[in-house]
Amino acid sequence: MGANFRIDVTRQNRSILFKLHGDLNGSSACEVLRRMENYKGSALIILDFSRIRKCHPFGIDILKKGIRKEVIIKGFRS
């Protein structure tokens, strides 16, 4: 996984907020997808990138290919 990568998951009404921290690389993105599977019946998933220090292109590609439902993306900086 990326350096200091961690995921904080909280419920907000009927949605699930994933706060992503650290560096997002390929293995970090796989962990995000794996954790999302635990909430596949939830109404909405929000991915908050505002605390991501570095996004590796491979990690973004894995997320794009692996997300199978509608997700809201917050705090993404290119």
Image (spheres, rainbow, N blue to C red):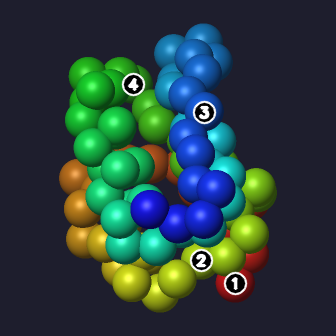
Question: What amino acid is at disc 2?
Answer: Cys
Residue visible at 47% across and 87% down in the picture: 57
Q: Quadrant of residue 3?
A: bottom right
> Residue 55: x percent and y percent?
59, 77
Q: Identify which amino acid the numbered label 4 is placed on.
A: Ala
Query: Of the residues shown, which amino acid type is indicated by label 3?
Result: Asp
The residue where tag 3 is placed is 8
Q: Pointers 1 and 4 in contact (CB under 8 A)?
A: no
> Does residue 64 show up?
no
Quarter of the figure that contains the N terminus: bottom left
For residue 55, which numbered disc appears in the image?
2
Asked where in the image residue 9 lies, by quadrant, the reply is top right
Q: Is residue 21 visible?
A: yes
Q: Residues within 10 Å of mark 1 (few under 14, many from 20)?
A: few
For the residue pair 44 and 78, the one nearer the viewer reads as: 78
On screen, residue 37 above or below 2? above
Q: In the shown orientation, is residue 42 left or right of residue 74?
A: left
Q: Residues within 10 Å of mark 2 (few under 14, many from 20)?
A: some
Determine the CA span between mark 1 and mark 3. 22 Å
Position of residue 38 measured from the top left corner of the image (x, y, whole percent): 28, 26
Pointer 4 residue: 43
Circle 3 — which element? strand
Marks 3/2: CA distance? 17 Å
Residue occupying the point 27% across, 43% down: 34
Mark 1–mark 4 Cα distance, whole angstroms, equals 27 Å
Identity, as a three-letter code, of the amino acid under mark 1 = Ser
Nearer-N-terminus badge (1/4): 4
Q: Earlier in the sequence, mark 3 or mark 4?
A: 3
Location of residue 54 in the rendering, given as x and y in whole percent from the top left corner: 67, 76
The label on residue 78 is: 1
